[in-house]
């Protein structure tokens, strides 16, 4: 009996500590605030998703869910000029439960999103857009004034009309289509898929990934393709026309267009190939160190 009484205070202490340990609970987020039509909004989210759409109001609506407590801090602050909100922490991402955010913003707002593994979806914004994720997928549609997207390992899926696009990954794939005045897309090992008949200027670069160009060629387009060991392949529309300047040092060249190419060999430069398709027009330049260069027509 005495032994039981001696250990009873300790047992009670342990029970109090256990009962006081907080249990993660889901918290609903519902914020509304006024903001200028061209105001700036910044969003952080480690895991989960961020979805941004537009409406014709001079205000922002934020809804979603987070888990509390967890190794991540919810923060929110807003003025008519802009707002900052989200969940962020220096703790390992693996310990953070996913948070889901949906934002409705003025159409001309400036949108800035940073995540770790969260998926980012942005649609309809006509102001500037800057989206960055470590491993999450990024999807952007609409007509942003300019667009910068980057993910270390996530996929970039872009369908926009814009004056400027910069897209960058390490291992993620990149898919681009739309009407773009000036575009630069680079990846180390990810593949690039380009539908660029409405691009004016473009540079597309990979190291080990393949680059695929599908469709037509704008009559005033100037497009550069650079690769080290991956393939650069063109699947062109039947009526595509343009001037091609191709170079490979150790790679191969395949021409299935039915148009005779002008070929010149050089020990220092490898193989130079010139080709005029149709009545000419847009200019295509390809440099590939040891990968394949392939020209084909659809169908």
Image (cartoon, grey):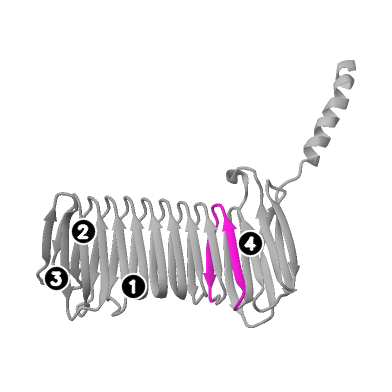
Q: Main secondary structure of the magenta part?
A: strand
Q: Where is mark 3, residue-wise?
A: 257
Q: Residue at x 11, y 72 (%)?
A: 259
Residue 94 position within the rendered picture, expressed as x and y whole percent measured from the top left? 58, 44
The residue closer to the viewer here, 51 or 8, is 51
Q: Residue furthest bottom?
A: 56
Residue 39 position within the rendered picture, expressed as x and y whole percent measured from the top left? 67, 73
Q: Quadrant of residue 37?
A: bottom right
Q: Residues at badges 4 and 3 in contact (C-beta under 8 Å)?
A: no
**Circle 3 SS class:** loop
Q: Where is mark 4, residue-wise?
A: 43
Based on the picture, tell me whether residue 117 belongs to the magenta stretch.
yes
Q: Quadrant of residue 20?
A: top right
Based on the picture, tell me whether residue 286 belongs to the magenta stretch.
no
How packed is label 1: few (under 14 Cα within 10 Å), some, or many (20 or more)? many
How packed is label 4: few (under 14 Cα within 10 Å), some, or many (20 or more)? many
Q: Earlier in the sequence, mark 4 or mark 3?
A: 4
Gap between marks 2 and 4 measured at Cα: 44 Å
* Segment colored magenta: 108-124
The residue closer to the viewer here, 181 or 196, is 181
Residue 294 position within the rendered picture, expressed as x and y whole percent measured from the top left? 19, 62
Q: Earlier in the sequence, mark 1 or mark 2?
A: 1
Q: Is residue 118 above or below residue 37?
A: above
Gap between marks 4 and 3 measured at Cα: 48 Å
Gap between marks 1 and 2 measured at Cα: 21 Å
How packed is label 3: few (under 14 Cα within 10 Å), some, or many (20 or more)? some
Q: Where is mark 1, residue-wise?
A: 196
Q: Is residue 171 above or below residue 121?
A: above
């Amino acid at each position: 009996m005495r032994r039981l009484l001696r250990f009873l205070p300790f047992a009670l202490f342990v029970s109090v500590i256990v009962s006081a340990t907080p249990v993660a609970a889901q918290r609903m987020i519902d914020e509304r605030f006024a903001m200028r039509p061209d105001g700036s909004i910044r969003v952080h989210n480690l895991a989960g998703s961020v979805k941004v759409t537009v409406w014709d109001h001079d205000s922002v609506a934020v809804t979603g869910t987070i888990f509390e407590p967890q190794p991540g801090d919810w923060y929110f602050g807003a003025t008519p000029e802009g707002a900052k909100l989200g969940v962020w922490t220096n703790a390992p991402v693996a310990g953070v439960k996913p948070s889901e955010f949906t934002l409705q913003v003025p159409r001309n707002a400036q949108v800035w999103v940073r995540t770790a593994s969260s998926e980012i979806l942005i649609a309809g914004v006509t102001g500037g857009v800057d989206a960055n994720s470590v491993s999450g997928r990024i999807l952007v549609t609409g007509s942003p004034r300019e667009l910068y997207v980057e993910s270390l390992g996530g996929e970039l899926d872009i369908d926009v009309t814009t004056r400027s696009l910069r897209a960058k990954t390490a291992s993620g794939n990149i898919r681009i289509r739309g009407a773009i005045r000036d575009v630069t897309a680079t990846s180390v090992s990810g593949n690039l898929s380009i539908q660029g008949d409405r691009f004016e200027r473009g540079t597309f670069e990979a190291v080990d990934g393949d680059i695929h160009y599908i469709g037509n060629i704008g009559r005033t387009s100037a497009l550069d393709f650079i690769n080290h060991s991956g393939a650069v392949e063109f699947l062109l529309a039947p009526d595509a026309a343009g001037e091609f300047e191709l170079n490979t040092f150790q790679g191969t060249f395949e021409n299935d267009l039915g148009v005779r190419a002008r070929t010149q060999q050089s020990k220092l430069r490898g193989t130079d190939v010139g080709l005029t398709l149709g009545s000419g027009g847009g200019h295509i330049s390809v440099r590939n160190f040891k990968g394949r260069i392939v020209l084909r027509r659809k169908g």
